[in-house]
Amino acid sequence: MAAATSAVSASGTVQAKPKDGDEVAVMETTQGRIVLMFYPTKAPKHVESFKTLAKKGFFDNTAFHRVIPGFMIQGGDPYSDPKRAAGPPGTGGPGYTVKAEPNDIKHVRGILSAARSQDRDSAGSQFFIMHAAYPSLDGEYDPYGKVVSGMEVVDKIVALPRDGNDMPTSIDQARVKSVRIVKWPVK
């Protein structure tokens, strides 16, 4: 727990790299690999939910269904997987919600945060990765991790052509192939 405690300063800035032995997520996408570290002392329920879903293969074959340059990329919706599509992308979840865990982490480039509806306690499986800082989200949404490698992949995904709903016009170019939970350093 000491490693996670030191990962975030009092000002809400975050440590750049995890400590040896910390669990991280390795997200393989059609655009390349993104490695995410977690902040379990800041948002333990969100971290646990993400890890549990990843270990079950929940995120496999989902897509980043919402990409907005200068803002973020959003994924984690099972409905973005053609085999599980039971509604429009952006409306699916794991069948449960995670209560809000407000914290002092700032929504800066590379931060992993919980997506939700207007209800603070409505987060589920959907998440977003910040493409750029967006201070108006601070204190309103629940950040729980950070990209430690692969921001160039986030840049590629956010640059994909998109429709009027900010969905990539070729959703297969924004696909999450798999998410694995492994120990740092990643081999």
Image (cartoon, grey):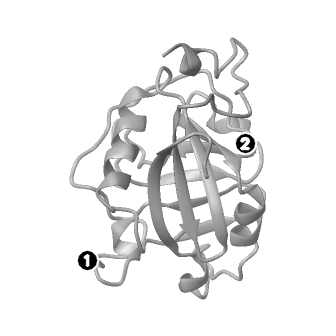
- The answer, for residue 142, to whether it is visible in the render is no
Q: As shown in the figure, which amino acid type bears the numbered disc 1?
A: Ala
Query: Along the line of sight, which residue is nearer the eye, 134 or 84?
Result: 84
What residue is disc 1 on? 86
What residue is disc 2 on? 134
Q: As shown in the figure, which amino acid type bears the numbered disc 2?
A: Tyr
Q: Residues within 10 Å of mark 2 (few under 14, many from 20)?
A: some
Q: Secondary structure at mark 2?
A: loop
Relative horizontal placement of residue 46, taking residue 159 as reference (left or right): left
Residue 38 in the image: above or below residue 158: above
Relative horizontal placement of residue 121, taking residue 165 as reference (left or right): left
**Residue 59 position by quadrant:** bottom left
Relative horizontal placement of residue 183, taking residue 135 as reference (left or right): left
How far apart, in angstroms, are the residues tagged by discs 2 and 1?
A: 31 Å
Residue 107 in the image: above or below residue 177: above
**Residue 43 position by quadrant:** top left
Residue furthest left in the image: 95
Residue 166 in the image: above or below residue 134: below
